[in-house]
Image: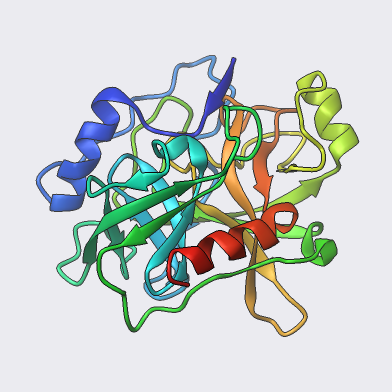
Amino acid sequence: MVRWRTLTGLLATALAAVTAGSLILAAPAAAADNPVTPNVVGGTRAAQGEFPFMVRLSMGCGGALYSSRLVLTAAHCVGATGANTSITATLGVVDLQSSSRITVRSNYVYRAPGYNGNGRDWALIRLATPVTGLSTLKIANTTAYDSGTFTVAGWGAAREGGSQQRYLLKATVPFVSDSTCNSYYGGQIIAAQEICAGYASGGVDTCQGDSGGPMFRRDASNAWVQVGIVSWGNGCARPNYPGVYTQVSYFASTIASAAASLGG
């Protein structure tokens, strides 16, 4: 079954408690026949300040700081375009319970025009006040960086069916060609709009709760550049089912125009 990489129901409710420091959820024990390794899956803990652009969103998604007032995330994480004060963004920390965390409410959501659950999986969230002192993550505006090895990070489940994490996890995943990815997914990949990454053997992947977070790599100047947005996949870290990401370069000009309309 194809799954969005969001948290729903109890897990999304519990996220707010984790952020507030009142609850820590432990991942359930893995079944003996579960092929998914429980270690973003296959990841390690990120260091404080390593990825200062990472954002945790209160509905159970991730995001990246596009500008001081805008967060780039997935369309399936948000509702329709319009005023929205219901989202809280947590920034500036790897530990969601840290007393140093920055929290800012949203005031507007812009969902990709024409989004219908099939492709176009990007959105911008405008924050009520600008965030200062944190680096933003630039987006790829050409396909030059849409291959190689990528970094993913998030507070999502560390195993399929697990709970969200208190600490930010990171991992690296290799590019998977559109043709190979489509052979795994039976032609479901929208080649122009989506990019795949993962290992044929599985074991490392984004998972539920990582939706909307960035997939990124170094550019020619050794700066981080975002090439993908966590979108969907068949389970988490299963063999021959790489993660599927919104291909940022395809939407770069549209994202930039939308950002400009929201104040940059």
Q: Nearer the viewer, residue 24 or 123?
A: 123
Residue 148 appearing in the image:
yes
Which residue is farthest right? 179
Q: Left or right: 143 with respect to 5?
A: right
Residue 41 percent location from the top left of the image? 52, 41
Q: State the quadrant of the N terminus.
A: top right
Q: Nearer the viewer, residue 99 or 90?
A: 90
Q: Is residue 64 above or below residue 122?
A: below
Which residue is farthest left? 22
Res. 233 image quadrant: top right
Residue ID at (65%, 57%): 254
Q: Is residue 142 above or below residue 110?
A: below
Residue ID at (31%, 75%): 131
Residue ID at (58%, 28%): 116
Q: Nearer the viewer, residue 36 or 66?
A: 66
Q: Nearer the viewer, residue 243 or 103?
A: 103
Residue ID at (36%, 24%): 29
Residue 195 percent location from the top left of the image? 74, 44
Q: Left or right: 254 with respect to 178?
A: left
Residue 107 percent location from the top left of the image? 27, 56
Image label count:
0
Q: Left or right: 195 with respect to 235?
A: right
Res. 197 image quadrant: top right
Res. 120 image quadrant: top right
Residue 157 appearing in the image:
no
Q: Is residue 76 above or below residue 96?
A: above
